[in-house]
Image (tube, grey):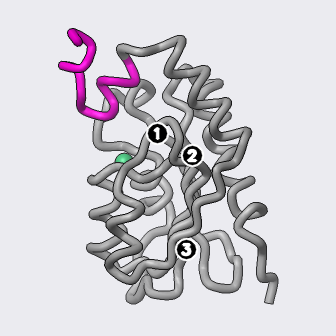
Protein backbone atom coordinates (compact mmCIF):
# COMPACT_ATOMS: atom_id res chain seq x y z
CA UNK A 1 0.00 0.00 0.00
CA UNK A 2 1.20 3.46 -0.83
CA UNK A 3 -1.78 5.30 0.59
CA UNK A 4 -1.32 8.98 -0.13
CA UNK A 5 -2.93 12.01 1.45
CA UNK A 6 -5.37 14.09 -0.63
CA UNK A 7 -2.78 16.87 -0.61
CA UNK A 8 -0.14 14.61 -2.23
CA UNK A 9 -2.65 13.39 -4.81
CA UNK A 10 -3.43 17.02 -5.59
CA UNK A 11 0.25 17.64 -6.34
CA UNK A 12 -0.11 15.54 -9.50
CA UNK A 13 -3.20 17.42 -10.66
CA UNK A 14 -1.54 20.76 -9.88
CA UNK A 15 1.50 19.76 -11.92
CA UNK A 16 -0.86 19.01 -14.82
CA UNK A 17 -2.46 22.44 -14.43
CA UNK A 18 0.98 24.05 -14.69
CA UNK A 19 1.68 22.02 -17.84
CA UNK A 20 -1.53 23.30 -19.35
CA UNK A 21 -0.59 26.87 -18.48
CA UNK A 22 2.86 26.41 -20.04
CA UNK A 23 1.17 25.22 -23.23
CA UNK A 24 -0.90 28.39 -23.35
CA UNK A 25 -4.02 26.61 -22.15
CA UNK A 26 -6.50 26.85 -19.30
CA UNK A 27 -4.66 25.79 -16.12
CA UNK A 28 -6.87 23.01 -14.79
CA UNK A 29 -5.32 19.62 -14.08
CA UNK A 30 -6.65 16.27 -12.93
CA UNK A 31 -5.57 12.74 -12.15
CA UNK A 32 -7.33 9.45 -11.55
CA UNK A 33 -5.93 7.18 -8.83
CA UNK A 34 -6.70 3.70 -7.65
CA UNK A 35 -7.71 3.24 -4.02
CA UNK A 36 -4.13 2.41 -3.01
CA UNK A 37 -2.76 5.60 -4.53
CA UNK A 38 -1.61 4.10 -7.83
CA UNK A 39 -1.80 6.69 -10.60
CA UNK A 40 -4.10 5.47 -13.39
CA UNK A 41 -4.14 8.52 -15.62
CA UNK A 42 -3.42 12.23 -15.55
CA UNK A 43 -4.26 15.13 -17.82
CA UNK A 44 -5.24 18.74 -18.21
CA UNK A 45 -7.72 20.98 -19.96
CA UNK A 46 -6.92 21.12 -23.69
CA UNK A 47 -9.63 23.44 -25.01
CA UNK A 48 -7.02 25.78 -26.50
CA UNK A 49 -4.30 23.27 -27.35
CA UNK A 50 -6.58 20.79 -29.13
CA UNK A 51 -9.38 23.14 -30.12
CA UNK A 52 -11.63 20.73 -28.24
CA UNK A 53 -14.13 22.23 -25.81
CA UNK A 54 -14.96 18.78 -24.45
CA UNK A 55 -11.40 18.04 -23.34
CA UNK A 56 -11.59 19.06 -19.72
CA UNK A 57 -8.90 18.07 -17.23
CA UNK A 58 -10.99 15.31 -15.66
CA UNK A 59 -11.96 13.97 -19.08
CA UNK A 60 -8.32 13.97 -20.19
CA UNK A 61 -7.22 12.07 -17.06
CA UNK A 62 -10.13 9.66 -17.40
CA UNK A 63 -9.28 8.86 -21.01
CA UNK A 64 -5.59 8.46 -20.19
CA UNK A 65 -6.50 5.82 -17.59
CA UNK A 66 -7.98 3.56 -20.26
CA UNK A 67 -10.70 0.99 -19.71
CA UNK A 68 -11.72 -0.41 -16.32
CA UNK A 69 -14.57 -2.63 -15.24
CA UNK A 70 -15.20 -0.88 -11.96
CA UNK A 71 -14.50 2.68 -10.81
CA UNK A 72 -15.91 2.50 -7.28
CA UNK A 73 -12.49 2.38 -5.68
CA UNK A 74 -11.00 5.14 -7.79
CA UNK A 75 -10.34 8.75 -6.80
CA UNK A 76 -10.68 11.63 -9.26
CA UNK A 77 -8.44 14.51 -8.21
CA UNK A 78 -8.93 17.88 -9.85
CA UNK A 79 -7.49 21.32 -9.20
CA UNK A 80 -10.92 22.96 -9.57
CA UNK A 81 -14.47 22.06 -8.59
CA UNK A 82 -15.72 19.81 -11.42
CA UNK A 83 -18.16 21.36 -13.90
CA UNK A 84 -21.50 19.64 -14.55
CA UNK A 85 -20.08 17.77 -17.49
CA UNK A 86 -17.23 16.28 -15.46
CA UNK A 87 -19.48 15.74 -12.45
CA UNK A 88 -21.69 13.75 -14.81
CA UNK A 89 -18.67 11.68 -15.83
CA UNK A 90 -17.99 10.86 -12.16
CA UNK A 91 -21.61 9.76 -11.70
CA UNK A 92 -21.83 7.90 -14.99
CA UNK A 93 -18.86 5.68 -14.21
CA UNK A 94 -19.43 5.45 -10.46
CA UNK A 95 -16.10 6.99 -9.40
CA UNK A 96 -16.15 6.63 -5.62
CA UNK A 97 -14.23 9.68 -4.46
CA UNK A 98 -13.34 13.17 -5.67
CA UNK A 99 -10.64 15.45 -4.31
CA UNK A 100 -11.15 19.09 -5.26
CA UNK A 101 -8.24 21.54 -5.15
CA UNK A 102 -10.46 24.56 -4.76
CA UNK A 103 -14.04 25.76 -5.20
CA UNK A 104 -13.48 29.50 -4.63
CA UNK A 105 -13.05 30.67 -8.22
CA UNK A 106 -15.66 28.25 -9.59
CA UNK A 107 -18.17 26.00 -7.87
CA UNK A 108 -19.46 23.18 -10.04
CA UNK A 109 -21.09 19.91 -9.06
CA UNK A 110 -19.06 18.74 -6.07
CA UNK A 111 -21.92 19.27 -3.59
CA UNK A 112 -24.29 17.45 -5.92
CA UNK A 113 -21.81 14.56 -6.08
CA UNK A 114 -21.53 14.46 -2.29
CA UNK A 115 -25.32 14.29 -2.13
CA UNK A 116 -25.18 11.20 -4.32
CA UNK A 117 -22.78 9.29 -2.12
CA UNK A 118 -19.46 10.30 -3.64
CA UNK A 119 -16.76 10.93 -1.01
CA UNK A 120 -15.84 14.55 -1.74
CA UNK A 121 -12.87 16.32 -0.19
CA UNK A 122 -12.45 20.05 -0.88
CA UNK A 123 -8.98 21.26 0.05
CA UNK A 124 -9.25 24.98 -0.83
CA UNK A 125 -5.57 24.80 -1.69
CA UNK A 126 -3.91 28.21 -1.88
CA UNK A 127 -1.78 27.31 -4.95
CA UNK A 128 -4.87 26.29 -6.90
CA UNK A 129 -6.85 29.38 -5.87
CA UNK A 130 -3.97 31.69 -6.85
CA UNK A 131 -3.41 29.94 -10.19
CA UNK A 132 -7.05 30.19 -11.27
CA UNK A 133 -7.57 33.70 -9.89
CA UNK A 134 -4.60 34.95 -11.89
CA UNK A 135 -5.70 33.15 -15.04
CA UNK A 136 -9.30 34.39 -14.87
CA UNK A 137 -8.12 37.97 -14.30
CA UNK A 138 -5.78 37.77 -17.29
CA UNK A 139 -8.00 35.79 -19.68
CA UNK A 140 -11.65 36.51 -18.80
CA UNK A 141 -13.01 35.75 -22.28
CA UNK A 142 -11.27 32.38 -22.48
CA UNK A 143 -12.46 31.46 -19.01
CA UNK A 144 -16.09 32.35 -19.71
CA UNK A 145 -15.92 30.36 -22.93
CA UNK A 146 -14.70 27.34 -20.96
CA UNK A 147 -17.48 27.40 -18.39
CA UNK A 148 -20.08 28.00 -21.08
CA UNK A 149 -21.16 31.41 -19.90
CA UNK A 150 -20.07 33.74 -22.70
CA UNK A 151 -23.19 35.82 -22.08
CA UNK A 152 -21.82 36.82 -18.70
CA UNK A 153 -19.29 38.99 -20.50
CA UNK A 154 -22.05 41.38 -21.52
CA UNK A 155 -23.17 41.89 -17.92
ZN1 LIG B 1 -15.33 19.79 -16.69
Measure the C-alpha gap from mark 3 to mark 2.
14 Å
Q: Is residue 135 above or below residue 95?
A: above
Q: Quadrant of the N terminus?
A: bottom right
| Image marks 3 and 2: residues in contact by CB distance under 8 Å | no
Is residue 150 a member of the stretch shown in magenta?
Answer: yes
Helix, strand, or loop for circle 1?
loop
Q: Residues within 10 Å of mark 1 (few under 14, many from 20)?
A: many
First in residue order: circle 3 vs circle 2: 2
Task: Determine which residue is flagged by label 1.
Answer: 45
Q: Residues within 10 Å of mark 3 (few under 14, many from 20)?
A: many
Task: Determine which residue is flagged by label 3.
Answer: 75
Q: Which residues are magenta?
A: 142-155
Residue 9 rendering spot, x and y as whole percentages:
71, 63
Task: Determine which residue is flagged by label 2.
Answer: 29
Q: Is residue 122 above or below residue 106?
A: below
Which is nearer the eye, 125 or 4? 125
Total numbered circles: 3
For image coordinates 67% across by 34% down, the residue present is 18
Amino acid sequence: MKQLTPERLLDVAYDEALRGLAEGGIPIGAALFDADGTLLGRGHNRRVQSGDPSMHAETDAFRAAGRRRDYRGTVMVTTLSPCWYCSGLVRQFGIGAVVVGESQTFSGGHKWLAGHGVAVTVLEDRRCIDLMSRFIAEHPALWHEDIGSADDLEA
